[in-house]
Amino acid sequence: MKCLSFIVLLIIFLKGHCVEQYCKINDAEHCKERDEGYKYKKVEKYEEYIEAIHNAERNYIECNATRCECFKDIIIRDLKPFKKNGISKELIDIAKTRGTFYQIIGGKLYREKDCMFPSRCAGIEHFLLKIIHNLTDMDLVVNTRDYPQSNKHFGKPLPVFSFSKTPQYYDIMYPAWAFWEGGPAISLYPRGLGRWDQHRELLNKASENIPWNKKKEKVFFRGSRTSSERDNLILLSRKNPNLVDAQYTKNQAWKSDEDTLHAPPASEVPLESHCAYKYLFNYRGVAASFRYKHLFLCRSLVFHVGDEWTEFYYDAMKPWIHFIPVPKDASQTDLKELIQFAIDNDILSEKIANRGRDFIWHKLRMKDILCFWKKLLKSYGKIFSYKPVLDKRDGIGDCDWFNFGGNEFDWLGGEGTIGGSE
């Protein structure tokens, strides 16, 4: 009799556990219909988020990481405007004013002498030199500025390579220089944020040292005020410091506390320290944010604000599957509700955090970056309408060209070492 009573009590407990732990998150379909009312009574204001997650999971098909297949659609899309008529010498000549001019001729890499940002060029050249022997002859205009160059509302499409863009631009996206070097320089990273391979290992170790159940149940953000889109999170933090720890840091344009929303600037924080928090916010900067990919490796839940600015890998990551999408004009009330939803649905939050981390860890490796560069340039090289030949730079002189050979370059009349070589 005692045994029977124990079994009855156990069944009651398990049924109650199903309602409390699962009906209010994305496993509701596995609970009985009579439990549905309980779920929505508990989280009625979250119904919109729950439905968005259900729809995302029903429609999601995981991409194949083999041969960087996850990103092939970006190459097809970005080269499409040039495919019908091909890339002409005239288009390249017009595009030259929008970036740094490179040539790949006979398995060698050449670059015009002047590069607006030498460390950024070095980051790009690191990858080009690794794949150059598999490429046909071609001319390249690579934009190392933050902003894209070929606007759809002004003139014909120009074959300019840019690391980031919005749907308003024709630019061809390539993996940013910062995967190797030349990223944003701050006091913690005075030579710029780079070496993605090294940051991967450091962040993975940090995430292992601070698993989900040991992380602080709080939003964390540090960054400069590059956009007013960030203001509401900062103001919410000042009103609700137990919920959000978000503060502005200095940037090169900082002059007074007015530039940090009338508060003293906070100290910069290493990327690994972000892993101590369950919830991390990502905002665009001038263009797409370099920090974005790093945040996922903390195994923290990433809140990604806005959807206009992208890099080549963004489209393969899906809202509600890998991250929580946040409108760029979200009010403080909107932000608070979304954050509270994540807190109230801890199992779901951890699930999304893990999916985001696994995508970046398994599908955005250094070999995937090289693979993308190779596929992009092989496809690009097939749509030239002329045969590129080495530009002798008439009237300027041969010494204005770099000829990169292996890990050294020749000034067609001198020798030196490439900055940033391995």
Image (cartoon, rainbow, N blue to C red):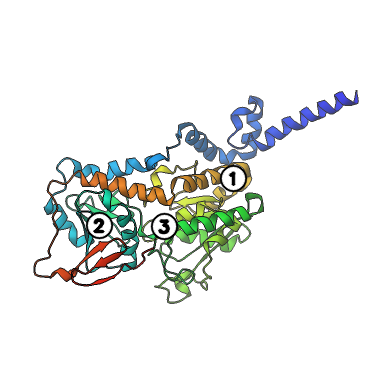
Q: Which mark is residue 256?
A: none
In the visual, does 231 lie left or right of 241? left
Depth check: give the residue in front, 322 or 197: 197
Q: Which residue is mark 3?
A: 289
User: Residue 19, can we see it?
Assistant: yes
Q: Earlier in the sequence, mark 2 or mark 1?
A: 2
Marks 2/3: CA distance?
18 Å
Q: Of the residues shown, which amino acid type is indicated by label 3?
A: Ser
Q: Which residue is mark 2?
A: 149
* Residue 112 coordinates in the image, percent (x, y): 20, 65
Pick the quarter of the image with the C terminus. Answer: bottom left
* Residue 223 coordinates in the image, percent (x, y): 48, 64
Depth check: give the residue in front, 107 or 138: 107
SS state under label 3: loop
> Mark 1 packing: few (<14 Cα in 10 Å), some, or many (20+)?
some
Q: Of the residues shown, which amino acid type is indicated by label 2?
A: Gln
> Mark 2 packing: few (<14 Cα in 10 Å), some, or many (20+)?
many
Marks 2/1: CA distance?
39 Å
Q: Which residue is mark 1?
A: 350
| Residue depicted at 63% across the width and 59% down the height | 242
Pick the quarter of the image with the N terminus. Answer: top right
The answer to whether 304 is drawn above or below residue 190 in the figure is above
SS state under label 1: helix
* Residue 170 coordinates in the image, percent (x, y): 25, 49
Marks 1/3: CA distance?
23 Å
| Residue depicted at 30% across the width and 57% down the height | 129
